[in-house]
Image (cartoon, helix red, strand yellow):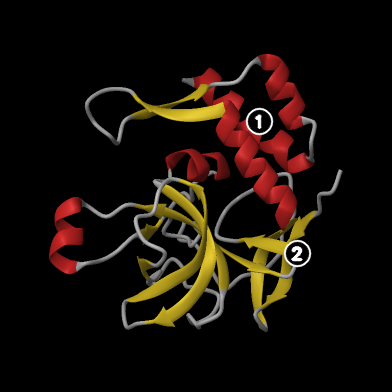
């Protein structure tokens, strides 16, 4: 099926008080999902270029993104460096903040789960729980990360197909109150989940959430 999964150890450790985003929530709840490479590193932010937009819109070819800030519940697996290839799940800054400070898109998730390094043909997920997949230690950019390893093309296929089958819609006037809905037919959903273990995982966790709500 063209997929590979296993487990990895990143230096992100999450406080028991913080519940990481589920993968389907990251996908449906992000204002932008973008693949790219760090071009410059600043004190509190970094510049992200060579963009490939998976979801959302970018007005420029470069994005200014707020760095993940280490805290007592977690830290980045390594320092930011130019040349690091990443897949990012982002929240758009408030309009007044963008106008006043010229900054910055924010990475979703306090556990670092919205920032996924890409090296070779694999993508690495960390700071997130993906049961029944198992975690393992991997070397990424010559540093150790603890999390999950997937074939990158399979992961991108799951992202694209997921957005055809599910969407997060606003429940009321509050943009923070949203509900997940199925937007494809049941036949299309079956075809999606049969593509790989990751596709199946995303379909099952999303249907479970829809049924619970």
Q: Which residue is mark 1?
A: 203
Q: Which corner quadrant of the image does residue 163 belong to?
A: top right
Please provide percent x and percent y for residue 205: 61, 32
Pick the front one: 127 or 65: 65
Q: Which residue is mark 2?
A: 121
Q: Examine the rendered structure and indicate whether residue 124 appears above or below residue 131.
A: below
Residue at the spot 71% in from the left edge and 57% down from the top edge: 152
Q: Is residue 192 left or right of residue 172?
A: right
Furthest-right residue in this view: 1
Q: Is residue 34 left or right of residue 147?
A: left
Q: CA distance from mark 2 to mark 1?
A: 24 Å
Please provide percent x and percent y for residue 97: 17, 59
**Label 1 SS:** helix
**Label 2 SS:** loop
Quadrant where the N terminus is found in the figure = top right
Residue at the spot 48% in from the left edge and 62% down from the top edge: 112
Q: Residues within 10 Å of mark 1 (few under 14, many from 20)?
A: many
Residue at the spot 54% in from the left edge and 21% down from the top edge: 183
Q: Examine the rendered structure and indicate whether residue 197 appears above or below residue 120.
A: above
Q: Is residue 153 left or right of residue 72?
A: right
Q: Residues within 10 Å of mark 2 (few under 14, many from 20)?
A: few
Pick the front one: 113 or 119: 119
Q: Which of the two marks, 2 or 1, is nearer to us in this view?
A: 2
Q: Examine the rendered structure and indicate whether residue 198 appears above or below residue 44.
A: above
Q: Is residue 17 visible?
A: no
Mark identifier at residue 186: none
């Amino acid at each position: 099926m063209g997929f590979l999964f296993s487990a990895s150890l990143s230096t992100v450790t999450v406080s028991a008080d913080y519940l990481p985003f589920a993968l389907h929530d990251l996908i449906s709840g992000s204002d932008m999902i973008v693949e790219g490479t760090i071009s410059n590193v600043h004190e509190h932010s970094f510049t992200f270029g060579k963009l490939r937009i998976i979801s959302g819109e970018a007005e420029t070819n470069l994005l200014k993104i707020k760095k993940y800030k280490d805290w007592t519940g977690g830290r980045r697996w390594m320092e930011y460096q130019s040349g690091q290839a990443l897949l990012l799940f982002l929240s758009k800054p408030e309009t007044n903040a963008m106008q006043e400070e010229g900054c910055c898109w924010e990475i979703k998730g306090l556990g670092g789960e919205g920032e996924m390094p890409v090296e070779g043909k694999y993508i690495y997920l960390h700071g997130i729980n993906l049961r029944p997949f198992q975690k393992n230690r991997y070397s990424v950019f010559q540093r150790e990360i603890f999390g999950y390893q997937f074939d990158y093309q399979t992961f991108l296929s799951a992202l694209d197909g997921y957005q055809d089958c599910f969407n997060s819609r606003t429940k009321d006037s509050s943009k923070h109150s949203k509900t997940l809905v199925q937007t494809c037919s049941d036949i299309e959903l079956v075809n999606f989940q049969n593509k790989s273990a990751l596709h199946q995982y995303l379909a099952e966790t999303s249907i479970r959430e829809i049924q619970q709500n």
